[in-house]
Amino acid sequence: MSALPAKPGLHHSVSEWFSNNHQLSATAQHERHISNVIRQEGRSLRNETSCKTTWDESETSRRLSDRAWDVARWRDALETCAQKVDEEMEALTLTKERTEQALAATDVPNEVTSECLTLRDGRRGFELVTDPVDEQLKKEAELIKRVQQELQQHIDKAFEQLCVLQEARHQLTADLQNKMDALDIDMSCLSLTIKSPQISLKPNPTRVPSGSTTPQEWVQFSRYNVARAKEAMQVSQQMREDMSLTTAQLQNELDNQRRATEFALRKRNHHEEQARDELEWQIKNTEDEMAEMESDIHGLDADLQAKTASLKLAHTRLENRTSRSGMDLCRDEVQHCLVNEVHQLEATITALKQKLSEAQNSLQKMKLHHSRMLQDLSRKQEALSLEQRSMNTRTRLTSAYCKDKAPVLLVPLTNSSGRSNLQLLTQ
């Protein structure tokens, strides 16, 4: 059996054939047009992105350069400020050491003054008096004590200020180290190019690191550190000036006190004579006052007796009025007036008794003191002649003692005067 021929396919018309050919040509032309448009857009995009990338890289490099300049400027400012802080700390330390030396030097004047007071306390009999020489020596001792306290206060304040400067220096150093590290990183970034072997893609490079600050905060932080350091240096400079001025003032006070003590020593003989005349005058006035006091005591006693009689009258009236009966036992105005009168009289009697007791005690004290003054007058007349003889024989010894001992108060503080500190401020 012969094989059957294949079934012929669907036949198209000539018009369909032409339409198919036209469609193929139109589609090819359309695809070529689209391809041409895409190629042109691609070339334009390449040119545009290439320029944009080049510009962005250039702008980033410029901004990195500007940022590095800002960081370098603040680095230099921090370095300069830190250097000034170091200089101020050194100057303040030197001033503090000199003040400590001045404080240590006051030990010798203090010992000398204490020895003088001890020697004068060794006087016997009624010559052991608190005369102007003793007062001046005590003032001198108090002055030296105050000088030591003020110097110690300045030393303590200087130590505290050194701690403040040290803290400011630490902040400057930390900020300066951060600036140097940031400058190294920015300069390293500025040196990178697309051909650098260190570049690579990083995961999530646009993330914001924790602890990031704004440029305003960055500038404000460095400004605060510099301002704090400058403020601390200003306080330190003022403190050094105050220490120098205080040292000079204390030196003048010690010198004036030394002169006052010497003047009191020269007037000792004159004061002895004045003390004798003053004692005689006091005895006369005391006798007059004793007579006046005795008269006033008699008056107080008489007035006390009169007030006691008035109190008895008021008590009797009150007691008699308690005998009223019935509704007539009324707390009327008379009752209130009598009660007030009793209270007033009792207070008056108490005050009179107290004042009488005070007057009697005062009179007794004056009598006792009068007898003491009479006894002291005779001894003081004898002591005055002995004092004259002692001064005549010990004039040169006293002068030598004043010349040898008094300048000791000046030597230590002269070495620690404020002149060196003032010169330090101009360095």
Image (cartoon, helix red, strand yellow):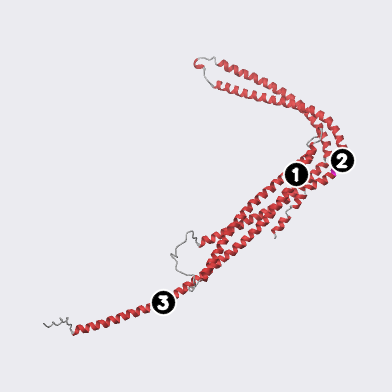
Residue farthest toward the left in the current orientation of the protein = 1
- Magenta segment boundaries in residue numbering: 394-399
Residue at the (71%, 46%) spot, across then down? 148
Which label lies toward us, 3 or 1?
A: 3
Spatial separation of the CA atoms under disc 3 and disc 2: 116 Å
Of 99 and 333, which appears nearest the observer?
99
- Residue 90, how many percent across, how many down? 67, 57
- Asked if 332 appears above or below 415 in the picture, the reply is above
Residue at the (25%, 81%) spot, across then down? 23
Earlier residue among tags 2 and 1: 1
Residue underneath mark 1: 110
- Asked if 308 appears above or below 108 in the picture, the reply is above
- Asked if 303 appears above or below 52 in the picture, the reply is above
Q: Residues within 10 Å of mark 2 (few under 14, many from 20)?
A: few
Residue at the (45%, 73%) spot, across then down? 53
Residues marked 3 and 2 touching at CB (< 8 Å): no
* Left or right side of 234 for 282: right
Residue underneath mark 2: 394
Q: At numbered mark 2, what does the secondary structure look like: helix, strand or loop?
A: loop
- Residue 79, how many percent across, how many down? 61, 62
Residue underneath mark 3: 46
Q: Quadrant of the C terminus?
A: bottom right
Of 279 and 328, which appears nearest the observer?
279
Spatial separation of the CA atoms under disc 2 and disc 1: 25 Å
* Left or right side of 124 for 168: left
Hey, what amino acid is under mark 3?
Arg
Of 413 and 98, which appears nearest the observer?
98
Q: At numbered mark 3, what does the secondary structure look like: helix, strand or loop?
A: helix
Of 314 and 58, which appears nearest the observer?
58
* Left or right side of 392 for 226: left
